[in-house]
Amino acid sequence: MRRFVPFPLPCLVPPSTTQASTSSFGIRSSSTSIANATLQSIPGIDHLSPIWSAYPGNNLTSSLNPTLFTAAHTTLLHRIANGAPSGGWSSAWCTNLAARFFDPATVEYCIYRLFFNAIGPSLLNSGLPADWQIDGNLGGPAGVAEVLLQSHEMVAGGNSSSLVAVQTGATGYVPLIRLLPTLPPQWVSQGGAGHVTGLRARGGFTVGIEWDAQGNLTQATIVSESGGSAYVVLGQTVIGAAGGKALNMQGQGAKSAAVFLRLDTKVGGKYVVKLA
């Protein structure tokens, strides 16, 4: 099996740390001197545990805590500017974090690192510290899914204009489904239109998404497995913020257009969402 190279080589340039500049190294520690000493001695270390709350954690988001969100993004960019990621597992983690930070350029870079540093002819991940890394094997596809669909945020409020973000895991609230939150431009320019099927969203939903050759949403099909409710938004619009592209739902349970479109579903119901 030949190696698949999805993007042109000129994309292999680390993203600039000027994209976010909350502090020199992102999140500040209560033990600032210790944290800075560690970052200075190994500035490109692959471990990204200080920003775990962004991914795989769910409680560091642009809506809940925007300052820390920007700082965490800065931390990732600082690591990358100094040589990270070097292995398959860290490239996969970097991809998922970049998707959560709505940073398509860094997504492209980290996927490149994964393919060129850690993926063999079998498309399985290998390399130090082990010959076969399950976190690289599964983390890479997880990152691709995170680029196309996110559902880790929770919202409260009765209508699109009064929504507020709440901590993940809080009871009595509904998930927010983000369609195409971090679609890299190269995924469009190299192959035209695209589609994905079978993605799973929190709350018991199966999602398929189609986009055109410009990266615009064509339609999303959402099937409810449990009959719950959810809000749907396109892209990275902050919860409760003005702006964003309005969506409408066609067919069963059709509703008027909204940037944050609420779905109140029935078990087995199929809902088609398009640009208004």
Image: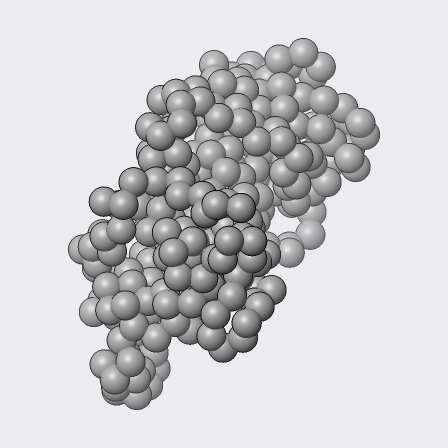
Res. 171 visible in picture: yes
Front residue of 204 and 109:
109
Whether residue 216 is situated above or below residue 4 in the rendered picture: above
Q: Is residue 39 above or below residue 138?
A: below
- Give percent across and percent down for residue 201: 64, 41
Kindly give the residue lying farthest to the front in the view shown.
1
Instruction: Name, please, the residue furthest toward the top.
Output: 251
- Write down the quadrant of residue 57 in the picture: bottom right
Q: Residue at x 29, y 80 (%)?
A: 42
- Residue 269 x/y as whole percent: 76, 24
Q: How is the image coloured?
A: one colour
Residue 220 is drawn in which quadrant? top right
Of residues 256 and 77, the one drawn nearer to the viewer in this rendering: 77
Residue 187, image x, y percentages:
39, 34
Which residue does the image show at 49% across and 18% down from the upper left? 218
Q: Quadrant of residue 252?
A: top right
- Say which residue appears at 39% left-offset and 61% top-offset: 117
Left or right, residue 92 beside residue 9? right
Residue at image position (69%, 47%) is: 172
Asked if residue 36 is positioned above or below residue 44 in the image, the reply reads: below
Q: Name the foreground residue: 232 vs 122.
A: 122
Q: Residue 99 appears at what percent x and percent y? A: 43, 48
Q: Is residue 78 visible?
A: no
Position of 174 with respect to 108 (left or right) is right
Labels in figure, total: 0
